[in-house]
Amino acid sequence: MVILLNLYLQNNYKSVIDILEQVDLTQFTDYERHDLEYWLADAFYQTGEYSKAQEIATSALEKNENDHLSLLLAMIYESQGNHKKAKKQYLKLVTQYPKSDFFSSARIKFRILGQP
């Protein structure tokens, strides 16, 4: 897990994807699995594979809803050009996580996407 963290922090997203696609994530604790799923979704997002990122982020959110994944999913939707879904996801983050570190960013993005 430390090796993966180092690869992720070094923005070596291709290696993170290669490793995590070969690992059975159910062998990890819930806490570790949530981190690994986030890293995998973000790695796909960072490499422009938005559909895969969306699939993983959506699945992970169904199991463990949190502000990090909510923000990532909103960013994925926005990158795909789906501003309606992105706006909805930013609003969800703002309303469900008012104490989140991402609150201000999500609120700004929501307002920007709401402008004609």
Image (cartoon, rainbow, N blue to C red):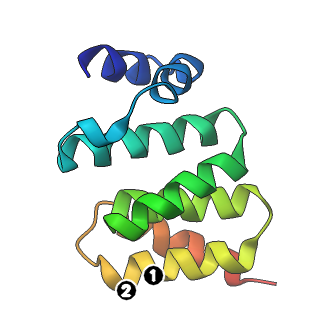
Q: Position of residue 21 (x, y in %)?
A: 52, 30
Query: Residue placed at 70% from the left, 48% from the top?
Result: 50
Three-letter amino acid code at the position of disc 1: Lys
Find residue 75 and report its horizontal and vertical position in percent. 60, 58
Q: Secondary structure at mark 2?
A: helix
- Residue drawn at point x = 35 percent, y = 38 percent: 25
Is residue 66 in view? Answer: no
Q: Is residue 65 visible?
A: yes
* Tag count: 2
SS at circle 1: helix
Relative placement, left or right, of 92 versus 115 is: left
Compute the Cα span from label 1 to label 2. 5 Å
Q: What crowding class fits label 2: few (fewer than 14 Cα within 10 Å), some (14-19), or many (20 or more)?
A: few
Q: Residues within 10 Å of mark 1 (few under 14, many from 20)?
A: some
**Residue 10, quarter of the rendered image:** top left
Label of residue 40 in the image: none
Q: Is residue 99 above or below residue 55?
A: below
Q: In the shown orientation, is residue 40 left or right of residue 109? A: left
Residue denoted by label 2: 95
- The disc labelled 2 sits on which kind of residue? Thr
Up/down of 8 relative to 72, above or below: above
Quarter of the figure that contains the C terminus: bottom right
Figure check: 85 above or below 29: below
- Image coordinates for residue 32, horizontal then vertical, percent: 23, 40
Q: Quadrant of residue 76?
A: bottom right
Q: Quadrant of residue 43?
A: top right
Q: Vertically, is 28 above or below 116?
A: above
The mark found on residue 92 in the picture is: 1
Q: Are the residues tagged 1 and 2 within 8 Å (C-beta)? A: yes
Place of residue 69 in the rendered image (x, y in percent of width and height, measured from the top left): 42, 58
Residue found 71% across the figure and 41% down from its top? 49
Identify the image quadrant of the N terminus. top left
